[in-house]
Image (tube, helix red, strand yellow):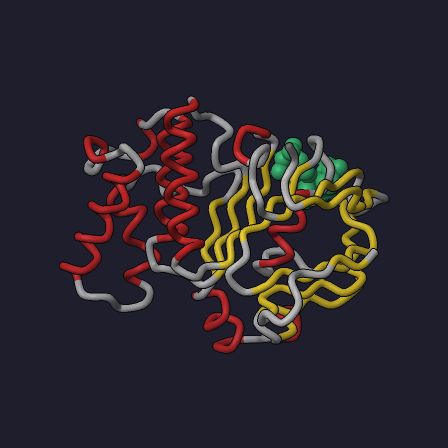
């Protein structure tokens, strides 16, 4: 199955017949062909175990496909090595479903990490961290060790870290799973802002409140296969 993005726009993500199997016999993704345009916001939905996280892990090269080709910005991500792969990864921000925070560090330190890797000035980092925490309603948690935060707070720190360095591609896995409606809106406002600023955003979610009225494309996975594709569900 081939899913095309809008014609005439540069492609950010291209999958050609991608499958992912986990031993001994789990088929997590099957023959997925998909094209996502640069600057697009794209939703991946589906039941638990459908393959959403697997797809995001393949897109950031955390997992390699069992077969098929994945290109990011025209580059075959699984054939890149060393500094070429590191350079591409720096342009990808990932908010993991299981957060992967450094739980003995503060909120601010966790968010700053992605910017320190790119050698930004300390005052620029401090300002960006404060801005992001403010937008996510976490200003009062700036100096709190993330291990002491609630799950919903940790989830937002994860998102702030993913977008802090202004990546061109943002992968978010269940960004609103632990959040109330108002905080969900804050998170989506921030992701929409990143998208309007030009970032390609791929969101894996169960939360129909965030894609129900969207005009962006929504792909449902069922047992690793794409099942329907819309420009938003009414
Ligand atoms: N490392 C792994 N080893 C073996 N099986 C795995 C591994 N990771 C995922 N799977 C299996 O692959 C399938 C897809 O998992 P995946 O995590 O992609 O689903 P998901 O759609 O993200 O689910 P959820 O909504 O619960 O997060 C599931 O059957 C899962 O058990
Ligand atoms: Mg998942």
Give the camera-side residue of 234 and 147. Answer: 234
Residue at the location (43% across, 61% down)?
A: 198
Q: Quadrant of the C terminus?
A: top right
* 197 relative position to 38: left or right: left
Relative image position of residue 115 (x, y in whole percent)? 30, 60
Residue at the location (77% across, 53% down)?
A: 20
Residue at the location (43% across, 47% down)?
A: 192
Relative image position of residue 222 (x, y in whole percent)? 78, 38
Q: Is residue 141 visible?
A: yes
Q: How many marks?
A: 0
* 160 relative position to 16: left or right: left
Relative image position of residue 109 (x, y in whole percent)? 26, 47
Asked if 10 appears above or below 178 in the picture, the reply is below
Residue at the location (63% across, 72% down)?
A: 8
Classify the position of ligand 2 by quadrant: top left, top right, bottom left or bottom right. top right
Quadrant in the rendering for residue 180: top left
């Amino acid at each position: 199955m081939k899913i095309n993005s809008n014609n005439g726009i540069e492609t950010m993500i291209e999958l050609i017949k991608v499958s992912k199997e986990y031993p001994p016999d789990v088929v997590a993704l099957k023959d997925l062909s998909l094209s996502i345009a640069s600057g697009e916001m794209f939703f991946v939905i589906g039941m638990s175990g459908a393959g959403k996280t697997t797809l995001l892990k393949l897109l950031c090269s955390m997992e390699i496909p069992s077969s098929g080709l994945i290109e990011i910005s025209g580059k075959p991500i699984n054939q890149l090595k060393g500094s070429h792969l590191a350079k591409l990864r720096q342009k990808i921000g990932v908010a993991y479903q299981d957060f992967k925070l450094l739980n003995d560090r503060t909120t601010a330190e966790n968010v700053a990490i992605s910017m320190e890797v790119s050698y930004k000035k300390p005052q620029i980092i401090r300002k960006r961290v404060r801005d992001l925490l403010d937008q996510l309603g976490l200003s009062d948690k700036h100096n709190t060790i993330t291990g002491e935060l609630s799950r919903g707070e940790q989830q937002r720190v994860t998102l702030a870290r993913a977008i802090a360095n202004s990546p061109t591609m943002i992968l978010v896995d269940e960004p609103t799973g632990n959040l109330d409606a108002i905080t969900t809106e804050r998170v989506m406002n921030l992701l929409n802002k990143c998208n309007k600023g030009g970032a390609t955003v791929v969101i894996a979610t169960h939360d129909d409140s965030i894609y129900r009225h969207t005009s962006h494309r929504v792909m449902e996975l069922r047992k690793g296969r794409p099942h329907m594709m819309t420009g938003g569900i009414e």
